[in-house]
Amino acid sequence: MKLLLLRGLPGSGKTTYAENLIKANSSWKRVSKDMLRDMLSLGQIDEKNEFLLNQASHTLIIYYLTQGFNVVSDNMNLDPKQVQLLVHKTCMKLNTFNMLNQLEIEVKEFYTSLEECIERDSLRPMPVNQSIIEHIHEKWFDKDNLMVPLDLRRILKEYI
């Protein structure tokens, strides 16, 4: 079973990639914090909702993996600490089911230009908006337009 973490700005193509993946192969399930946010809090973003949303997202990912599905997470996955927490929870839970040795984790990064992400976002029914995308880019990308590094090997080291 595989956990595929997609990383990138809003509008970078993560959701389109995830939707195409699950359309092409029924062994994949998609977990989307955007969809959960709309369902659980009508899209409202605040600290309490985000905490609950992360818990719900982690629970769904772990559930699908324990049922033998592959899971694609099309969240931004830009914060290494949040990715580390997700990987930690997933590995701990799968270990209790003696399934950890079956897990493969992959990260796919989307380096769509800031301008293209803003343009794509403007065409959405519920856009994130330009200033938020620019803020996210400023926080998680360097001057060369590279994402804050995610050292998956280091994160997985204690489980391998």
Image: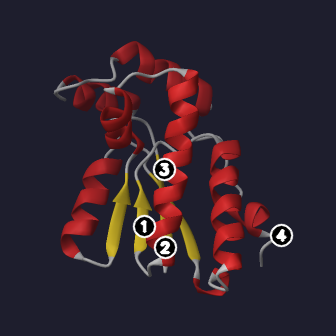
Q: CA distance from mark 4 to mark 3?
A: 23 Å
Q: Are marks 1 and 2 in contact (CB under 8 Å)?
A: yes
Q: Are marks 1 and 4 in contact (CB under 8 Å)?
A: no
What amino acid is found at the position of numbered circle 1 in the picture? Val
Q: CA distance from mark 1 to mark 2?
A: 7 Å
Asked which secondary structure carries label 1, the reply is: strand
Asked which secondary structure carries label 3, the reply is: helix
Mark 2 vs mark 4: give the one in front: 2
- Which of the two labelled residues, at mark 2 and mark 3, occupies the earlier sequence position? 3
Residue 31 vs 106, above or below: the answer is above
Q: CA distance from mark 2 to mark 3?
A: 12 Å
Side (left or right) of 147 relative to 27? right
Q: CA distance from mark 1 to mark 3?
A: 11 Å
Asked which secondary structure carries label 2, the reply is: helix
Q: CA distance from mark 1 to mark 4?
A: 22 Å
Mark 1 vs mark 3: give the one in front: 3
Q: Residues within 10 Å of mark 4 (few under 14, many from 20)?
A: few
- Which of the two labelled residues, at mark 1 and mark 3, occupies the earlier sequence position? 3
Q: Residue at x 40, y 77 (%)?
A: 69
Q: Are marks 4 and 3 in contact (CB under 8 Å)?
A: no
* Residue receiving disc 2: 65
Give whichever of 124, 147 is nearer the camera. Answer: 124
Side (left or right) of 101 relative to 67? right
* Residue receiving disc 1: 71
* Residue receiving disc 4: 158
Q: Residue at x 44, y 82 (%)?
A: 68
Asked which secondary structure carries label 4, the reply is: loop
Q: Residues within 10 Å of mark 1 (few under 14, many from 20)?
A: many
Side (left or right) of 3 relative to 82? left
What amino acid is found at the position of numbered circle 2 in the picture? Leu
- Which of the two labelled residues, at mark 2 and mark 4, occupies the earlier sequence position? 2
